[in-house]
């Protein structure tokens, strides 16, 4: 029996090319496994073979999507895999978007495709209905488990085997509904679920309803010229040396720093510790992330009454949803207490 031909996709970091300083590298391909593909090859245990590894810089794949798409299509046509496996991308948003793009291109070519990401990866919502995505933990510490889940699903897809529900096959729900004939009458199933609920037991609904967190937009300021504004950033801009130890990724806290009397942020006193992009340009001029210099000009011109003396800072890179909600609530509470009426939120 012939082995399943697998093409694996990874980013520039896992390809061993470099970190954020190499995120602009264009697409490339090498024969055989590379980086985490070596783990994938071991997990396949003779059932499959990684015939090629496609790689691309995270920035390039997202900023030059059409060029990346063309390159991916050419590589896949060249190696003719039975299935494509992309990632795992864990919580890395740009990596996840690139994985989704590769898998989408594969599907367009009639090639089954699977990726692996954390459920909170931004790419999940964009691609979940088009491709299969195996769930991962937040960090690479669970690389082996993540690849094992994705490879099991990939082999089933390559073998044209029936794929069950997300719960049965261990992939993220795709938001698609299919009809099937159940063994029990609907009345029996309904009563069984009701009794489990009354007893406080766990049960699975047959018609899950998606739940979306909707935040109504704040009303516009009626008198901007008389309002106090504050700056909030997820760009990781902190006093030089990062004395408080703000995390460069998966932040669990936020900090407040005084900008009273400062006309701008100097490179001698401030830096960005964000781990999700190359901070070289930002650290030469921190005002490119936190535009204090421009806001001081607007303040002087009377565009708004005054700028608050405090800068509120966290890191948005791979932040968990629960922490992000908590940050927003806590910072908003501080803003209300200090009489701030509007916020300039700057990201990366």
Image: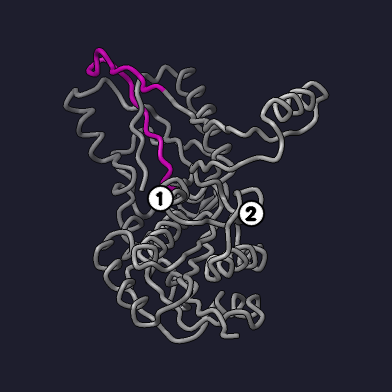
Label disc, if present, on residue 170 of the rendered structure: 2
Q: Nearer the viewer, residue 276 or 312?
A: 276
Left or right: where 267 falls relative to 257: left
Q: Give the number of the mark in front: 1 or 2.
A: 2
Q: Quadrant of the N terminus?
A: bottom right
- Magenta stretch, residue numbers: 216-236
Determine whether the residue tagged by mark 1 lies in a helix, strand or loop.
Answer: strand
Left or right: where 46 falls relative to 347: right
Say which quarter of the image contains residue 225: top left
Badge 1 or badge 2: first in the primary sequence: 2
Q: In the displayed structure, would residue 108 be above or below residue 190? A: below
Q: Nearer the viewer, residue 134 or 328?
A: 134
Image coords of residue 240 (percent x, y):
45, 53
Q: Label 2: how many residues lie within 10 Å, few (<14), some (14-19) or many (20+)?
A: some
Q: In the displayed structure, would residue 290 be above or below residue 333? A: below
Label disc, if present, on residue 315 of the rendered structure: none
Image point (25%, 34%), residue name: 296
Q: Which residue is mark 1?
A: 270
Image point (76%, 28%), residue name: 192
Say which quarter of the image contains residue 59: bottom left
Q: Label 1: how many residues lie within 10 Å, few (<14), some (14-19) or many (20+)?
A: many
Image point (45%, 45%), residue name: 125
Image coords of residue 248 (percent x, y):
51, 54
């Amino acid at each position: 029996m012939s082995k399943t031909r697998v093409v694996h996709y990874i980013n520039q970091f896992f390809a061993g090319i470099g970190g954020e300083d190499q995120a602009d590298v264009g697409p490339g391909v090498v024969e055989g496994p590379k980086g985490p593909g070596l783990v994938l090859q071991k997990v396949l245990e003779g059932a499959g073979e990684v015939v090629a590894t496609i790689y691309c810089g995270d920035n390039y794949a997202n900023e030059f999507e059409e060029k990346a798409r063309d390159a991916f299509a050419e590589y896949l046509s060249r190696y003719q895999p039975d299935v494509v496996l992309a990632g795992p991308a864990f919580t890395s948003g740009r990596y996840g978007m690139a994985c989704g793009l590769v898998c989408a291109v594969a599907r367009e070519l009639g090639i089954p495709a699977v990726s692996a990401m954390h459920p909170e990866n931004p790419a999940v919502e964009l691609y979940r209905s088009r491709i299969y995505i195996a769930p991962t933990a937040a960090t690479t510490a669970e690389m082996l488990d993540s690849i094992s889940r994705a490879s099991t699903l990939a082999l089933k897809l390559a073998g044209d085997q029936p794929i069950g529900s997300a719960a049965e096959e261990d992939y993220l729900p795709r938001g698609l509904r299919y009809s099937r004939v159940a063994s029990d009458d609907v009345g029996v199933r309904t009563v069984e679920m009701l009794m489990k609920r009354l007893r406080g037991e766990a049960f699975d609904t047959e018609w899950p309803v998606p739940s979306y967190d909707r935040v109504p937009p704040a009303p516009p300021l009626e008198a901007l010229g008389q309002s106090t504004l504050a700056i909030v950033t997820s760009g990781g801009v902190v006093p030089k040396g990062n004395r408080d130890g703000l995390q460069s990724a998966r932040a669990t806290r936020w900090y407040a720093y005084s900008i009273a009397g400062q006309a701008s942020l100097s490179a001698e006193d401030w830096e960005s510790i964000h781990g999700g992009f190359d901070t070289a340009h930002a650290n030469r001029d921190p005002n490119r992330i936190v535009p204090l210099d421009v806001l001081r000009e607007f303040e002087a011109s009377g565009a708004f009454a005054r700028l608050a003396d405090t800068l509120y800072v966290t890191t948005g890179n791979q932040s968990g949803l629960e922490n992000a909600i908590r940050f927003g609530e806590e910072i908003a509470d501080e803003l209300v207490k200090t009489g701030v009426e509007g916020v300039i939120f700057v990201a990366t």
